[in-house]
Structures are given as structure tokens and as C-alpha cells.
Image (spheres, rainbow, N blue to C red):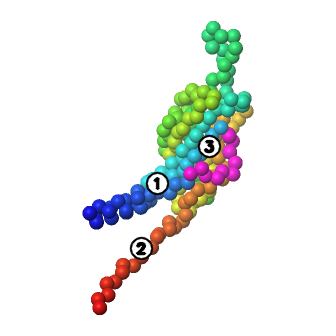
Amino acid sequence: MKKLLLIIFLLPSFVGFGQLITKMPEIDDQTSYETDITKVEIRGGYTIVSFSYQVSQRKNNSYQFQFPFPNQGQPSTNYTISFNPKSYLNGNGKRFKYIKSTGIPEMPEEKQVFAGEKYRFTVYFEKLDAGIETFNLIEGKNRPEERHQYWNFYGVHINNPLVQKVIPTPPAEKKVEP
């Protein structure tokens, strides 16, 4: 019974071992306010960035295009999203490459999205070096002549100390015999 209680007590500390999580990181600037970084995890060999995207019903952005649906006189807006596999993280002057994404297609493929609905997706990059606590996520250069808009984030602040804090274990009590 004591072993079971010890395992239950220690298990939570092992689950978080080797990973750093920053929820809703502070961001200095970004190119799209329809996209949010909801979490950054540093674990295993990756930096994992979780996103939330919601098309604004009021905005008219260059990456939208309109077309009339058959049998309808009014044009309707078609929104699509995708992620650029040429994107990277830049921290302390070093680039960390894109690995893969889940929940969103890679360019040139696109996923149709609808105004008012929220979409979540995750993007994996090479693992940031310990000590990099601010990075830029660069997806691409926005140009007015292109129909899509890249999501760039500047000054993303995360928890990634150079040295992880080690919580000291209290010394075992010595048995004193009378």
C-alpha cells in the first residue's frame, strides 16, 4: 500500500519532467489579430506552438476572395487557411526549422473556414535552445498583391530558462535511538 501511495504522489512530477509549457504567451506584435498563439510547449525534440484562428465577420482582408454561389445573386466570401512549410522560429539570431503541422494543411493546400467559427491547429518546429525566452515566428513576407496573409509573430515570450530549476529533496530524517 505504501508503494502505491508513493507512486501516486510522485507520478505528477515525472509527467512534467523535461517539458516547459507557456499558456497564452505575451506577444509584442503580430501581423494578424485573427490568429492567437494559445500555448508553446518545449518537449522532446520539438517546440510545439498551438494556435486558435477565428475569421472576423467585420474585416475585409487581402487574403479573402469573393465569388457568387450558383443560383444566388449576392457574392459570398470564401476564407481559407494553410501553413507555410518554409516558416521558422528565430531566437537569439538562430533559425529553428518547421517540422510539421496538425489540424491545418501545408501550403499550397488550403482548408475552407467560416466566419464566426474557431479553428485550432498545432505546428511543430525544431526545439529551441535552453535560455531562449523570446522568439519570432516568421511564416512569410506579406505582399499586397498576394491573396493570402502570412501569420508572423514578433517577441513571443515563453518560459525556457537556461538552467531548469531543481527542487531540492529534503534530507531524510535520521532515527535517533534513546
- Tally of marks: 3
Residue type for callout 2: Thr
Instruction: Categorize mark 2 by other alpha carbons within 10 Å: few (<14), some (14-19), many (20+).
Output: few
Q: Residue at x 64, y 32 (%)?
A: 55
Residue type for callout 1: Arg
Instruction: Categorize mark 1 by other alpha carbons within 10 Å: few (<14), some (14-19), many (20+).
Output: some
The answer to which of marks 3 and 1 sits earlier in the sequence is 3
For disc 1, the marked residue is 43
Left or right, 1 with reference to 63 = left
Q: Mark 2 and 3 residues: CB-CB less than 8 Å, in contact?
A: no
User: Residue 114: horizontal and vertical position, in percent?
Assistant: 60, 27
Residue extent of the magenta highlight: 23-33
Please state, as top left, top right, bottom left or bottom right, where the C terminus lies in the image.
bottom left
Give the SS element for disc 1.
Answer: strand
Residue 58 falls in image quadrant: top right
For disc 3, the marked residue is 36
Inspect this view and state whether residue 145 appears: no
Instruction: Please tell me the numbered disc located at residue 169.
Output: 2
Left or right, 71 with reference to 106 = right
Inspect this view and state whether residue 68 appears: yes
User: Residue 120: horizontal and vertical position, in percent?
Assistant: 54, 38
Please state, as top left, top right, bottom left or bottom right, where the N terminus lies in the image.
bottom left
